[in-house]
Amino acid sequence: MKSISQVITSRETLPRTARNESRTRRADFPILSNRPDLHYLDSAATSQKPTVVLDAIRQYYENDNANPHRGAYDLSARATQRYLEARERVADFLGVIDSSTLIFTRGTTEALNLVATAWGRTCLKKGDEIVITGMEHHANFVPWQQLALLVGAKLRICDLTADGRIDLDRLKKLLTAKTKVVAFSHVSNALGTINPVAEIVAMVEKHAPNAITVCDGAQSAPHMRVRIEELGVDFFAFSGHKMLGPMGIGGLVGRRPLLEKMPPYQMGGDMIEFVGDERTTWNVLPHKFEAGTPNVADAVGLAAACDYLEGIGMDGPSDLTQRSGVVSFTVEGIHPHDLSTVLDQEGVCIRAGHHCAQPLMRRLNVPATARASVYVYNDQSDVDALIRGIERAQQMFR
């Protein structure tokens, strides 16, 4: 967790060229270009949407909207093609070779619940062990906790080092032949810590060869070049709305052998092959896990977001001591909720609370923190406004 002095110092972390580019990019985002007094520093919760994404969604509805996979007419065929192209584009953005192993979901939360439900309830049994970390978002904590309670497995939590990283030595000791799941975030939503995914996967393969690895990529996919094949995880979950895409779309990427063995997550139209009176057979990937009418428009919008991000470049953090664009902090004598209220009066949007990471807050021995998170449209003026707002709050609560 950063101190207030470190927050102030962060004003100097952006190169001058990056600051100028950020000002130019701000014009691509209507909600920001129409509000020059708005300083949006809550992108870890959800990002703003560029015009190209909004246009892609609108153009789909105006020109290609129909129910895909079901109609024999031209408009339905076009909708089907747009959905297919969106899947291939997002898969390519994430370095996924087999696009059929990308399952569209409502976001990271649903993707992680899909694994815990479809894989966990059929593959875990009493006495098995699930390993998670103490920095997990509730979406990668509670499903495993509840699954362990349901089947009689044991939930083991790997604690963190003093500087907010996964304690790899401790993790190694937790891995045994009983370990069947190791779930962890690529980037912490509360601390900004970037975890060494490939190193963790290699450790699991060596010390817990029967375990699957599940990676929460909600905070990494928006900020760095993700190549899932190189990371080596069995499952990778992500959200579109954190990477300039619309809300209500995201995905799960899984290894084909695992996905093919898993039962469907939901039942309904399009995920079936044949429905008999007594038995039903399932459709092929990815359709087996996408019951009902798919969210085509938002998939198209997410594909447009991938185009926009790649146009900027996805090289990610260069030398930020392995931290992403998230700064969590506290100000002595001011509750984070009060601080957020004062900042809002200054046009500064930050998050205050436990950030859906209550187990982490307990480990940090704090009830809540303030969190500022930046993205491609932020520049020095946003950080300056944050600092002014903090100083004003300190004067008010002195």
Image (spheres, grey):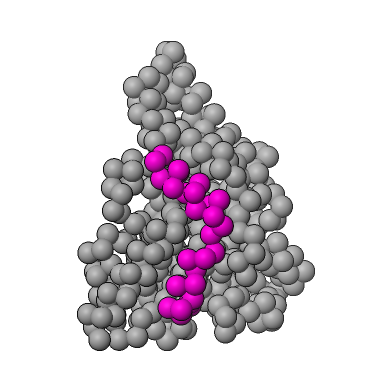
Q: Is residue 272 visible?
A: no
Q: Which residue shows up at 51% across the image and 38% down it?
A: 308
Percent from the top left, x then y, of residue 214?
59, 60
Q: Quadrant of the C terminus?
A: bottom left
Percent from the top left, x then y, of residue 286?
55, 38
Drawn side of residue 210 relative to residue 349, left or right: right
User: Which sits in the foreground, 356 or 317?
Assistant: 317
Q: Which residue shows up at 59% across the image and 75% down it?
A: 165
Q: Is residue 198 visible?
A: yes
User: Which sits in the foreground, 97 or 286?
Assistant: 97
Percent from the top left, x then y, of residue 291?
43, 39
Q: State yes or no: residue 103 in magenta.
A: no
Q: State yes or no: residue 18 in magenta.
A: yes
Q: Which residue shows up at 57% across the image and 35% down it?
A: 89
Q: Which residue shows up at 39% across the image and 59% down it?
A: 382
**Quarter assignment of residue 269:** top left
174 above or below 254?
Answer: below
Percent from the top left, x then y, of residue 256?
65, 45
Main secondary structure of the magenta stretch: helix
326 above or below 114?
Answer: below
Residues in magenta?
1-28
**Quarter assignment of residue 267:** top left
Total tally of numbered discs in the picture: 0
Residue furthest to the front in view is: 16
166 above or below 37?
Answer: below
